[in-house]
Image (tube, rainbow, N blue to C red):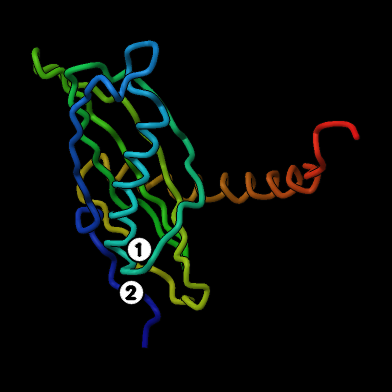
Amino acid sequence: MSDSVTPVSCNATLIVTSHRVFQPDLNEHQSVFGGKILSLVDDSASVAAVRLTHKTVVTASFDHVSFLKPFRLDDSMSLEAYVSGTGTRSLEVFAKIIGENLTTGKRFVGFTCFITYVIEDDSVTTKLPAMKPVTAEQRYICSGYATRTAQRRQRRQEQAELNANVTVASPWPE
């Protein structure tokens, strides 16, 4: 008996959502507020994670976050996300937002990132299925998963050291 699980196509986890930019989405620079973008991405990308795991997942980290071009009034934002790598309880989701100026039809990549989700249930011990990329983009994205995982491991060690030196004491002298 093999302990390998049949790989799952990245397209089986693919989600696509659209959002039209309106005035309340804008910051003082007349572009979409970064926090709004991160919220949209986390909300939508979690669907890709749950689509694979069929479990409750929590956001562990955002990394390689790139705000590449601003989204402006009357743009549409098409968010695509899919699972790009898996572990046992954790999985990585790649997300991108393609902007489109609705009056000219010009499209652009405005945002990319990787999000790590973790299955909330500690009793899960079976490795998640590997991902099977279909498109050239997916092959490129998935090929970097091991490198990004090693970077995250190193960052977790650095974060643990930082956390050990962060105080919870009141900032005001008594």
> Disc 1 to disc 2, how far (Cα)?
7 Å
Going by the image, does 165 lie left or right of 118?
Answer: right
Q: Residue at x 18, y 28 (%)?
A: 20
Q: Residues within 10 Å of mark 1 (few under 14, many from 20)?
A: some
Q: Residues within 10 Å of mark 2 (few under 14, many from 20)?
A: few
Identify the secondary structure beneath mark 1.
loop
Pick the quarter of the image with the N terminus: bottom left
Q: Residue at x 71, y 49 (%)?
A: 160
Where does label 1 land, which residue? 130
Front residue of 29 and 81: 29
How far across and how far down the image is residue 36, in percent?
A: 36, 32
Furthest toward the right, the residue is 174
Front residue of 116 and 37: 37
Q: Is residue 28 above or below residue 57?
A: above
Front residue of 10 and 80: 80
How far across and how far down the image is residue 55, in percent?
A: 36, 69
The three-letter amino acid code for the residue at tag 2 is: Val
Q: Is residue 61 above or below residue 79?
A: below
Furthest toward the front, the residue is 174
Pick the quarter of the image with the C terminus: top right
Q: Please identify the quarter of the rendering in which residue 38 is found.
A: top left
Going by the image, does 146 lie left or right of 96?
Answer: right
| Precedes in sequence: disc 1 or disc 2 | 2
Identify the secondary structure beneath mark 2.
loop
The three-letter amino acid code for the residue at tag 1 is: Ala
Asked if the residue at tag 2 contacts the one at tag 1, i.e. Cβ–Cβ closer than 8 Å, the answer is yes
Q: Please identify the quarter of the rendering in which residue 107 is found.
A: top left
Going by the image, does 67 lie left or right of 48?
Answer: right
Where does label 2 land, which residue? 5
Going by the image, does 91 lie left or right of 136?
Answer: right
